[in-house]
Amino acid sequence: MDDQLGKDVYFDFDFKDVAVVWDMGITTGRRCLVQDIVNRLLTPKGSHFAHPDYGSELYLFIQDEDTPINRMDLEQVAKIAIEEDPRIITGSTKVEVIEWNNDKITFTISTIPILDNTPLNMVVGYGYNITTVEVT
């Protein structure tokens, strides 16, 4: 099942550490799926030269006011972006904002990968120059 959920170059969740070419780390399975979900959420939609539909519009919410409407909008934007990944069961994703301040928006994600009935749960913190990911 690991290969069906993906295989990619390993990044730490600060997206700073990539092993040098002759010692490149590889990640597979659920860890790869988490990495790919986070990458999709953090990539501004339209910014990838080869895939203009790839990414999300989460960046639009940074420094916006914490209102019920903005929370619902962000949750919907994240859910849509996550479920664009074909490895995710459509309709299985739940996103909930748990903290919103000027520096960072923190939200939970629960989604179910294909071929796996075990939910994938994580907490993501997103802001300018701040990204935190905790898989729970």
Image (tube, rainbow, N blue to C red):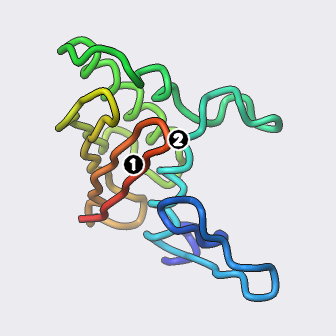
| Nearer to the camera, 127 or 68 | 127
In the image, residue 134 above or below residue 28: above
| Nearer to the camera, 129 or 122 | 129
Q: Give the secondary structure at mark 2.
A: helix
Residue depicted at x 21% and y 36%: 96
Residue type at numbered disc 1: Ile
Mark 2 vs mark 1: in front: 2
Residue that extends furthest to the bottom in the rendered view of this protein: 23
Image quadrant occupied by the C terminus:
bottom left
For the residues labelled 2 and 1, the Cα–Cα distance comes to 21 Å
Label 2: few (<14), some (14–19) or many (≥20) C-alpha neighbours in 10 Å: some
Residue 63 in which image quadrant = top left
Residue depicted at x 41% and y 26%: 77
Residue depicted at x 58% and y 67%: 11
Q: Which residue is mark 1?
A: 89
| Nearer to the camera, 125 or 82 | 125
Label 1: few (<14), some (14–19) or many (≥20) C-alpha neighbours in 10 Å: some
> Which label number is shown at residue 42?
2
Residue depicted at x 42% and y 59%: 114
The image position of residue 103, as x and y in percent, is 34, 34
Earlier along the polypeptide chain: callout 2 or callout 1? Answer: 2
Answer with left or right where residue 104 lies relative to residue 5: left
Q: Give the secondary structure at mark 1.
A: loop
The image position of residue 46, as x and y in percent, is 69, 26
